[in-house]
Image: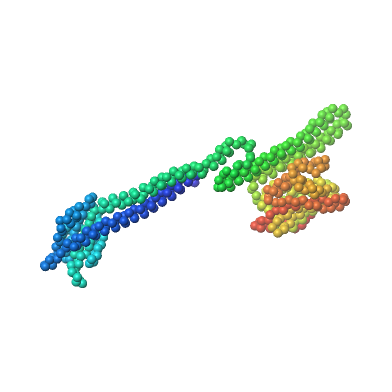
Amino acid sequence: MINIGPRSLKNQLRLWLLLTMLLVLGVSAALSYSRALLYATQAYDQALLRTVLALADEVIIDANNEVKIEIPEVTSHLLSYNEGDRIYIRISAPDGKLVFGEANLPPPTRPPGGNQQVYYNSFYKNEAIRAVTFGLPESNAVNANNILITMAETTGKRDALVAEMIEEMLLPQVLMMILAAIVIELGIHFALKPMQDLRESLLQRSHRDLSPLDTTVSPLELQPLLHAMNALLSRVKAGIQQQQQFIADASHQLRTPIAGLQTQAELALRSPSPEAVKEPLNYILRSTTRLSHLIQRLLSLARTDAASSQHVFKPVSLTSLIYDECARWVGPAADKQLELEVLIEAQQDQVLGDALMLSEMLNNLLENAIQYTPEQGLLQIRLWQEKQHLLLQVTDSGVGIPSDQTELIFERFHRLDPNQGNGCGLGLAIVAEIAEQHNASITVTPGLEHPTRYHIGSQFTVKFERDDTLPENPRPTSTDPE
């Protein structure tokens, strides 16, 4: 396939407008020619007919029934005077015998009746002629034959008159077309000038200038484009601000454990006895564990962002996802003597999504639940369907989340208690971002009551849109990994 490249909007406007003008001019020329030819033909045909009728008055029939014609001198001069054209006359008797004029002058294809005339076009002596033949009755008898009087003239004056009339009619139109073309060119230039101004405005901008474009002076046709560009600039600006905030938060989070590691290492080096080295080494161990966890979360977040930019979604079985993730966390759950229960209550368990991102989302929810649930607690994973939605729910009997913190926990680097656990405040932010990329919503409500402690845990519910075109789930509806 041939790539013709980008086309000029100005050239397309010029082409369509000029083609339309030429079409109008062509139609006008054709109509003008037909009308001019009609009027010229009618005028000269009437003049020919009047001359023929004048000749008919001079035709006589003598006592021997012979047809004769007597042309006065004045009439002869009138017939001979015809500036620019040649006139030919032929008068024939009822029996076809030539009475006067040109013997070879072409007759009409069908002779006219009595007191009738017929006009026709023909050629004589290699010239185009226009002729009229009049049927003059020999007598008033019913079956009397006619005397045929034919007069023809060349078409020079007719053609000149038609050309003059067309020129008179088309010249003003051509001048108007030229004036219209100039006006159109100026109109195209000034109409498209806002686009040129927009181009210049964008070229003069710095790459750091993401302020909205001015839409107050732009034409209505450019308003949708400018609004779309402003929306894009707003999204780019928000993305850059988010990245800048993320970099700032990440650098702060990394700076704290690294500084602590340096301090404790210096203390350990200055310690005189092995017993005194123990505490700095324990702190270094805790700090490296937290630092490792933070780096893993940062890498996970970067991996999630990269996957979200590709948007290659395929059918993913949430049931298989749940079993795979539970197999990874059944050991840590058993170490804390947690009761882990899985409930699959959906006949159709597939959603369109990215398996890696969804696995990361469920992994973070399970890790968060296991980390903040005391020993001998309860942990439940449930999948069920509700009308047009598929719901994935992770419920625990952990320490719970205050109602005023339910919105803040999904922000990056936000932690309820910085001194509790090895978390870095990115797990739930990753969960929220993955849910958003899959057009799913996530809510937090009170969870299960702990069997031995007086607190209620948390319940995270991710609501997906159902796709009825995907197959149903063949797995059993309920199971327990333990």
Residue 404 placement (x, y as % from top left): 79, 48
102 and 438: which is toward the camera: 102
Residue visible at 59% across and 44% down in the picture: 216
Residue visible at 39% across and 53% down in the picture: 27
In the picture, measured across the screen, residue 163 lies left or right of residue 199, that is: left
Residue visible at 58% across and 38% down in the picture: 202
In the picture, measured across the screen, residue 389 lies left or right of residue 136, that is: right
376 and 83: which is toward the camera: 83
Residue 287 placement (x, y as % from top left): 80, 36
Residue 155 placement (x, y as % from top left): 26, 53
Residue 107 placement (x, y as % from top left): 22, 60
| Residue 55, picture quadrant | bottom left
Q: Where 252 sits versus 69, above or below?
A: above
Q: Where 145 sits versus 232, above or below?
A: below
Q: Residue furthest left?
A: 64
Q: Residue furthest front?
A: 74
389 and 156: which is toward the camera: 156
Res 329 visible = no
Residue visible at 63% across and 45% down in the picture: 231
171 and 262: which is toward the camera: 171
How is the rendered protein coloured?
rainbow
How many numbered marks appear? 0
Res 277 visible = yes
In the picture, measured across the screen, residue 277 lies left or right of residue 348, that is: right
| Residue 267, picture quadrant | top right
Q: Where 291 sits versus 92, above or below?
A: above
In the picture, measured across the screen, residue 328 lies left or right of residue 230, that is: right
